[in-house]
Image (spheres, rainbow, N blue to C red):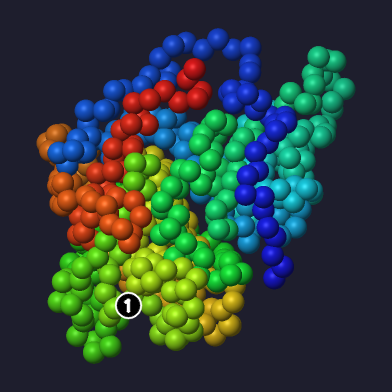
């Protein structure tokens, strides 16, 4: 497979679709109150470790998340290896907005709102593929790879005031990548992706930068629906090693060499949790015997080389195990090679999209072992994945009930224990802690309480 390097910064200088970061101009005069914002700051007590349950079930709060979280955060789009030639495209979502990521003739990846400017049908219905343009199947408006309206049937029936350049697809103004992962942001003035990732990059490198040639994805994207608010999954991947011994007891038993399970050993593991003020979080045991990797993959790695290339701490901790979330809804598991996005689909539902990421240098048998290992553990029927999905659905099931929704949730584990460690960047705490959860919801409340670019 050939390898295409994207420019790290892919800022649209002459964005034909959404100049100056505004919503599309129109001649409409909308009533006030359609997008009323609630003051939700009191629903999250990050210092005291308590959260109002309604942030997981309330429709109005969910709509506000679309405006104030998803319309202004860096959102994961795709892996660079999904785009090889001009016209390659991949259909995904930013929040609930359908978007098409496509490589244009200049070999830059553009992200376009998948919404025909005529009557609003999707102009692309395929999950992925290669095309010359996007033609809407309703009336036939056709757009090029940059989203420009290039033809429409019966153009003579419009007056000369009609200008095709006014009716391009809306383009996402910021598209940037880090170590193969492409993110996009509707806020043209958002801080650069690498700044938003902050010291989290050190932890990500332990996953994405083991191989000088980088990474690629195999096996397409696996998708499934879960009955649960998107934050339940994002939060768990940011902060929660606590559930492992209980929720995954049977899976740990199956995977242990003796078949009896390393439960006691695992329960007593020491480890670290990373958190930052962007709401990113990661956790991992730090112990020489702590391994959850596939044996062929373990035997493939040259750990002396990796300790030199990365650092001994990265190899001992976040490379060999762990979990992580990039705020708001992108998560990964470094040892399984799993990256995933938790697409919000209403306050009580999410759609999980998961990829397998492999090092480019892996021989075929190792790559196969890693791919199967990921599917076996964290595919839709994976022995760990099923435990997690069951828990989120259980937590969601009665979230909207009156007494339930007036009973706060507890995030007090490890409160006040956050510290600085010379070997591990950022703010860290013990492995068993809600620190990254408290931080994720602190960031959530901060954004939910601050007007976004489109509210000026
Ligand atoms: S809705 Fe797309 S051409 Fe009419
Ligand atoms: Fe889990």
How many numbered discs, if any? 1
x, y percent for residue 361? 59, 77
Is residue 412 or residue 234 the one in the foreground?
412
x, y percent for residue 90? 63, 52
Q: Which residue is at a point 60% across and 38% down the rendered structure image?
A: 174
x, y percent for residue 253? 23, 80
Whether 23 is drawn above or below 147: the answer is above
In-image side of 429 versus 8 (left or right): left
- Assign a secondary structure to mark 1: loop
The residue under label 1 is 291
Confirm if mark 1 falls within 8 A of ligand 2: no
Q: Is residue 164 visible?
A: yes
Is residue 448 or residue 46 the one in the foreground?
46
Q: Quadrant of residue 439?
A: top left
Q: Which residue is at a point 79% across and 48% down the rendered structure image?
A: 105
Q: Which residue is at a point 65% across and 28% down the rendered structure image?
A: 18
x, y percent for residue 360? 59, 72
């Amino acid at each position: 497979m050939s390898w295409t390097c994207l420019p790290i910064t892919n800022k649209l200088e002459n964005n034909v679709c959404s100049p100056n970061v505004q919503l599309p101009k129109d001649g409409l005069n909308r009533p006030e109150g359609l997008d009323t914002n609630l003051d939700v700051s009191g629903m999250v007590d990050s210092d005291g470790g308590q959260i109002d349950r309604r942030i997981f079930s309330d429709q109005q709060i969910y709509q506000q998340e679309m405006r104030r979280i998803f319309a202004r955060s860096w959102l994961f789009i795709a892996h660079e290896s999904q785009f090889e030639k001009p016209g390659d495209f991949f259909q995904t979502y930013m929040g609930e907005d359908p978007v098409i990521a496509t490589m244009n003739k200049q070999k830059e990846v553009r992200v376009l709102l998948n919404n025909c400017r005529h009557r609003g049908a999707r102009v692309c219905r395929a999950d992925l593929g290669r095309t010359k343009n996007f033609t809407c199947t309703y009336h036939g408006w056709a757009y090029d790879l940059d989203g420009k309206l290039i033809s429409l049937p019966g153009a003579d029936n419009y007056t000369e005031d009609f200008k095709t350049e006014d009716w391009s697809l809306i383009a996402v103004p910021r598209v940037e990548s880090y170590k193969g992962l492409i993110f996009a942001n509707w806020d043209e003035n958002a801080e650069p992706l690498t700044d938003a990732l902050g010291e989290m990059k050190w932890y990500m490198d332990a996953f994405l930068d083991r191989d000088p040639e980088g990474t690629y994805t195999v096996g397409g994207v696996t998708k499934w629906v879960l009955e649960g608010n998107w934050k339940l999954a994002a939060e768990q991947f940011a902060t929660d090693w606590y559930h492992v011994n209980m929720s995954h007891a049977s899976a740990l038993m199956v995977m242990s060499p003796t078949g009896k399970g390393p439960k006691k050993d695992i329960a007593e593991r020491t480890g670290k949790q990373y958190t930052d003020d962007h709401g990113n979080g990661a956790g991992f045991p730090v112990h020489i015997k702590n391994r959850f990797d596939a044996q062929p993959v373990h035997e493939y790695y040259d750990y002396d080389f990796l300790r030199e290339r990365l650092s001994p701490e990265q190899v001992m901790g976040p490379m060999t195990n762990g979990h992580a979330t990039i705020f708001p809804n992108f998560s990964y598991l470094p040892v399984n090679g799993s990256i995933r996005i938790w697409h919000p689909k209403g306050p009580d539902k999410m759609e999980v999209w998961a990829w397998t990421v492999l090092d480019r240098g892996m021989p075929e048998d190792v790559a196969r072992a890693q791919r199967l290992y990921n599917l076996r553990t964290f595919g839709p029927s994976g022995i760990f994945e099923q435990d997690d999905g069951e828990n989120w659905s259980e937590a969601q099931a009665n979230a909207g009930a009156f007494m339930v929704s007036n009973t706060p949730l507890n995030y007090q584990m490890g409160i006040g224990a956050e510290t600085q460690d010379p070997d591990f960047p950022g703010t860290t705490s013990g492995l068993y802690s809600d620190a990254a959860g408290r931080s994720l919801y602190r960031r959530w409340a901060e954004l939910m309480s601050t007007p976004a670019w489109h509210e000026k």
